[in-house]
Amino acid sequence: AVKKMPENQSLLLLDIAGVESLKRDDSDEFDRKMTLFAIMTADVILLNCEGEVSTSMVQTLKDCCRAYDQHRPAEKAPSILFCSREGDVGNLKQQIRMIREQVINGSTSPTIERTANHMLSCDEERVKVYDSAHRVQTISADATLGISEDLAFRMPDPAFIETAAKIQSFVLC
């Protein structure tokens, strides 16, 4: 069952460009700024990756976790939900544990462990592997229908939609 939002609360969904999704000279800097913005403003972050978390994203997460802890050590850190389109959940969890340990070991902050444990948890509700968030639907060219070339478009995967509903419940808890 999906919980109904209380009248005095708002839910803002923000879709930001993924790490390494833009081919720019300053893409690492842009990625860090966008990730830090999301972490500093969100209660929940859905990190959608292909297979393993990339080396660039690992470094970005470590930098942003430490920055969050430095600027807001007393506040409850956002929860990061990891969704992978391929691979297995065990490998993804192992990678998240490694990132968490690197965040903790690379800081002298007395609150970094609490921040890292909250942001980079590996419990069942926070780490999922899907075939894809979307399914590609193709329509072949057909002159009788006025379609001059093959068309491909994405449709949400039903399993991903179900998970999005669970995420909504997670946010509203």
Image (tube, rainbow, N blue to C red):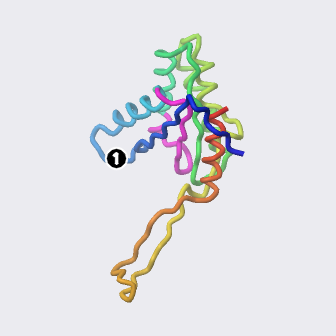
Identify the residue shown where x is 53% and y is 46%: 48
- Span of residues in magenta: 41-58
Q: Residue 2 is drawn in which quadrant?
A: top right
**Quarter of the rendering occupied by the C terminus:** top right
Nearest the eye: 21 or 156: 156
Q: Residue 158 is drawn in which quadrant?
A: bottom right
Residue 115, horizontal then vertical, whole percent:
59, 21
Nearest the eye: 150 or 92: 150
Instruction: Identify residue type, mark 1.
Output: Leu
Identify the residue shown where x is 63% and y is 47%: 165
**Quarter of the rendering occupied by the N terminus:** top right
Residue 6 can be seen in this image? yes
Q: Residue furthest bottom?
A: 144
Identify the residue shown where x is 54% and y is 12%: 108
Residue 9, horizontal then vertical, whole percent:
55, 30
Residue 111, horizontal then vertical, whole percent:
58, 14
In the rendered image, residue 53 lying in the magenta stretch gets the answer: yes
Identify the residue shown where x is 65% and y is 42%: 127
- Say above or below: 105 vs 56: above
Secondary structure of the residue carrying numbered label 1: loop
Q: Residue 80 is drawn in which quadrant?
A: top right
Nearest the eye: 15 or 26: 15
Residue 99 can be seen in this image? no
Q: Residue furthest front?
A: 7
Pointer 1: what residue?
Answer: 22
In the rendered image, residue 81 lying in the magenta stretch gets the answer: no
Please indicate whether residue 24 sits to the left or right of residue 32 in the image. left
- Say above or below: 119 vs 94: above
